[in-house]
Amino acid sequence: MGIEILALSLPSPASQWERLSSSHQASTRGFLEMAGLHLGSSALSQTVSSPKKIKVPATCSIQMLNHSGCHMESHTSLCYTKKNTVSRKCLWKHDSSSSNHRQSFKLCSSSSEALLTSTSQTPQDKLFLGNERVGVLLLNLGGPETLDDVQPFLFNLFADPDIIRLPRLFRFLQKPLAQFISVVRAPKSKEGYASIGGGSPLREITDAQAQALRKALCDKNVPAKVYVGMRYWHPFTEEAIEQIKMDGITKLVVLPLYPQFSISTSGSSLRLLECIFREDQYLVNMQHTVIPSWYQREGYIKAMADLIERELQKFESPMKVMLFFSAHGVPLAYVEEAGDPYKAEMEECVDLIMEELEKRGITNAFTLAYQSRVGPVEWLKPYTDETIVELGQKGVKSLLAVPISFVSEHIETLEEIDVEYRELALKSGIKNWGRVPALGCEPTFISDLADAVIESLPYVGAMAASSLEARQSLVPLGSVEELLAAYDSKRAELPSPVAVWEWGWTPSAETWNGRAAMLAVLALLVLEITTGEGFLHQWGILPRSFK
């Protein structure tokens, strides 16, 4: 009797993963050797395969037993993989008769106990997994909940050095500049949020996802508290971490709600976590791991295919509909210069969804494009707006938009896709328009997220085996430092993902006008800060303390 784990490594979309993968293998071997010493036995076998197309999905299974020796559940999950897949089978057993493991699991009573930033702590909230208290931290971008929140939300966004990068000499201007830009952009942004109800629904949806995930984990006999940490608005990641500390969590699974990894989304949140963890002794000692991306999981792929199949049936001629996958873009330099795996993972994700649809007899034409670009720098192509116009010119009459990088409705789906791109499509000659909803709390999707958390639990703290004196690793495939070094080594040299200023009607004019505006803004700020006088002080944009 014991726990049997069949672990499968993630696919490697970029060559940078090779170093991380070898580090992970070495750390896993060290962990298993320790498990063999303390738990009785261990075995490790590896097989390498490189199939051109998916034929048989790999299986990840975990048989869970409670600490009193009673079988609870046989848990199996399928992970779709494609290229350069390394299959790793680990047999890990423990002696259930040990006196240290006789406590049984205490199950939660209802889904309403999912904690986001709760301030109360009752005996019913004290959920244990053996001697451990397990937590799951969901990471997301965040968004303004009211129109009054728009300007401070934009300030938080532009105050992030990963969004606007200033030369080292001018970094002291980061916050004043963020304040200036947020004030200038707030009126236009408020119009967009007003058109979707006066605020972003992202927090409400993410809270609901957290509650659903908590319930799904409880149903699978894995009690855990689920927290929400937003990058740029409430509940901030820092707030979630404080609640995690208050609740005494000892094992933490970090789950970014971005299916595909990018240094501008998951990477930004991991950099923040890295700073927080280094500064707090409690967090240094807490075991934790990250699920970097999960676009290849069977549950996610099937949930997306279900939504697409459902929306296709709303068209008069479903087989004639073009499937239009639209993903959030990133600057091209992120992929070509920093090695961001986002593009490779996105393309593979679309291929996997189409293969699932083909199994159901759906063979519609499809394309992938990238939306939400800003500023003069080049972003991933093809662009969504340009592609829609081209499809209309080619005679496409029916288009079904599939937001592929979003799991929650927010301004980029409700306003950018539903309003701007729909109007553009109709003007371009496309007669029939549809849009697949974001996954939200789709049961298949939530259940698969719960499976992902369960499958990650054996890795929590495992990476510390190769360096016991070091801080615990955040990422199963290596430490945060290794991950950021692989994908982010040239981050300081990259252009900002959001331009400081936008101006002009052509790419050339936009570039030069943007540069001139940036220099003017910097000169203005330097002048006002040195003299303590000017309209920025008069309007209250710069605080009086700068005088």
Image: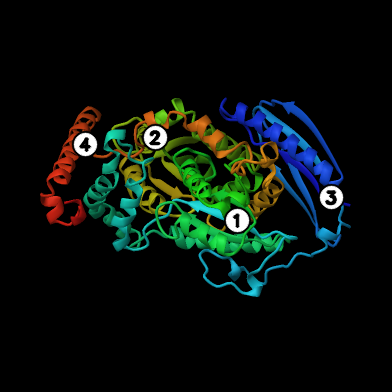
Q: Which residue in the protein does label 1 denote?
A: 136
* Among numbered discs 4 and 1, the one appearing first in the sequence: 1
Q: Which residue is mark 2?
A: 391
Relative placement, left or right, of 83 versus 375 is: right
Which residue carries the number 3 mark? 94
* Res 404 seen here: no
Asked whether 344 or 18 is in front, the reply is 18
Ranked by sequence position, the earlier of labels 1 and 3 is 3
Give the percent coordinates (x, y) of residue 509. Answer: 20, 30
Residue under numbered circle 4: 518
Residue 465 versus residue 19: which sits nearer the camera?
465
Cα separation, mark 2 vs mark 3, equals 59 Å
Where is residue 105 drawn, in percent x and y?
Answer: 75, 64
Q: In this image, 74 relative to 512: left or right?
A: right
Whole-angstrom CA distance, mark 4 to mark 1, is 41 Å
> Label 4 sits on what residue type?
Met
Label 2 close to label 4 by CB (< 8 Å):
no
Packing grade of label 3 (10 A; few <14, some 14-19, many >=20) is some
